[in-house]
Image (cartoon, helix red, strand yellow):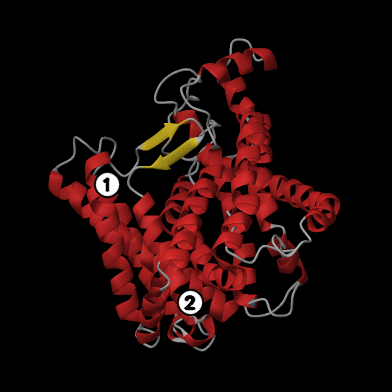
Amino acid sequence: MNSNVNVPFSNLRAVVILIVVAFHSALPYLASQPPHPFAFDAEPYRWVAFPIIDQQRWFGFDLFCAWQDISLMPLMFFLAGLFAPASLGRKGAFRYLADRWWRIGLPFVLAVAILSPLAYYASYRLTAVDPSLSAFWQHWRKLPMWPSGPQWFLWQLFVLSALASALYGFAPRWGEALSRWAGRLGKRPLVFVACLTGFSALAYIPLAMIFTPWAWSNVGPISFQYSRPLHYLVYFFAGFAIGAYGCERSLLRNDGPIARYWLAWLAGATICMCAWGGLTSLTLPDWNASPLVERLAAAAAFPFASAAGVMAYLGIALRLLRARDHLLDSLSANAYGIYLVHYVFVLWLGYALVGAPLNAVFKMIIVFSAALMLSWLTSAGASAIVGPRLKAAFKGPALRHSAIPRDGVVVDQTR
C-alpha cells in the first residue's frame, strides 16, 4: 500500500465492505419479512431486494440493516466525492471520465450480465417447480427488467462522476466555490451538518412523499430508489467540496472536531436513528394509508439520521482507525473486488442453509464468514492474475491506473 494513503479512510473502506457483506448476509433472517419466499414471476418482484427468505428470524438484524440502510449508502457516495477532486486535478476531465468507465462502467456491465443471474439463480430455486438452469434462464429472460442487485451503486456513481467531470471541464469555478464553502465551515461542524441535512431534506422529502421511501424503478439493468438519487447527489458533492479544499485542512483533519467528538456524533446518530425508526414504524405496513402528518414526520427524520450516521462513521475512522494493520490493508485493497462478487456467495450460502437446524444468528455468521473469505480470495486471486495484465495494457500516458482503488469505490445496500 502506498505510504501516502490516508490510513483512517483506507481502514474505513475495509470496515465498510465488512458491513456490506454482513448486511446482505442478514437479509434472509429479518423478522419483518413474510414467512415464505417471494414468487419469482409475481409482481412487484420483491425477491430482487430479498432473494433468500429463511424461516429463522431475529429482530436484531432488522435494527442493524435499518441503521446501515440510512447511513452507509450516503457515506459511500460521500467518500467517492471526497476523492474525486484529486483524481480530476491529476488527470483532467477527459482522462478522469475514461478512468471511471474502465473502473466503474465496464465492471457494472460485466457484473450485471454475468454475476447477477448467477446469484439470483439461487433465489429462483427457492420457489421453482423446475429448478433446472434452462428453466431459470427462460424465466429470467421473461422478466420486465434485468435485476442488477448491489451493482446499482456503480451506475449511479458513474453518472455522478460524469457530472463532476463535466462541471470540472466546462464550469471550473463551481469547484472553487465548493472549496471555499468547505473552508469557511472547517471549524464549524454543526453548521456543516446543518447545511448537509438541509440540502438532503430538500432532495429527499418531496420525492419520499410522492413516491414513498421504499419504491424502486427498474428499467433493464438500471434500477434506483425514487426517493434517494438527489439525496446521494448531495452527499457526493458534499464530499467533493471537502476533497477540493483538502482533508488535512477541513473538518476531516485528524485533530478536527469530527475526530475529537466522535462519541457525541455516535450518540447523536443513535438518537436520530431511534427517532427515525419510531416515526417510520407508524407508517407501516402501508405508507399510503398512514396519516399525512406521520408520513411527513418519518420523511423529515430521515435526513437527520442519515447525516448523523455519516458523521459518526467518519468520527470513528478518524479517531479509532489511525493505525496501519496488515489485514485491514489487504481488505481495503480488495474491497472493490469483494463488492463485485460477494453477492453470488451470499445468496448461494443462504440458499444452502435454508432448512438447516440452526438459529438465525448462527446462520448469518456462517454466511457472512464464508462469503467474506470466498470473496476476498476471489478478489485477491483475480488481482494477482489480471492486475498486471491490465496495468501493462493501459501503461500509456492517457490511461494509467493506480494499482489500488483510492476514490471511494467500495460498495451497496438494499438491492
Left or right of 85: which side holds 33? left
How far apart are the two marked residues, 2 and 1, measured between alpha carbons? 31 Å
Residue 263 appears at what percent x and percent y? 45, 78
N-terminal-most mark, 2 or 1 = 1
Give residue 26's position: percent from left, percent from top.
55, 44
| Residue 127 appears in view | no
Residue 54, by quadrant, is: top right
Q: Amino acid type of disc 2?
A: Ala
Quadrant into which the N terminus falls: bottom right
Q: Toward which corner of the image does residue 86 lie, by quadrant?
A: bottom right
In this rendering, the answer to whether 346 lies above or below 193 is above
- Judge by depth and name the residue closer to the eye, 245 or 134: 245
Please state the horizontal and vertical placement of residue 139, each as a whole percent of the image: 56, 16
On the image, numbered disc 1 is attached to which residue? Answer: 208
- The answer to whether residue 159 is seen in the rendering is yes
Residue at horizontal 61%, vertical 72%?
Answer: 90
Q: Which residue is mark 2?
A: 244
Image position, residue 219 (x, y; %):
44, 31
Kindly identify the residue that appears in the image at 43 percent across and 71 percent down.
172
Judge by depth and name the residue closer to the eye, 397 or 156.
397
Helix, strand or loop at label 1? It is helix
Residue shown at 67%/62% (left/top)?
405
Amino acid at circle 1: Ala
Local packing at callout 2 (Cα closer than 10 Å; few below 14, some 14-19, many 20+) is many
Dot in front, 2 or 1 = 2
SS category of the residue bearing label 2: helix
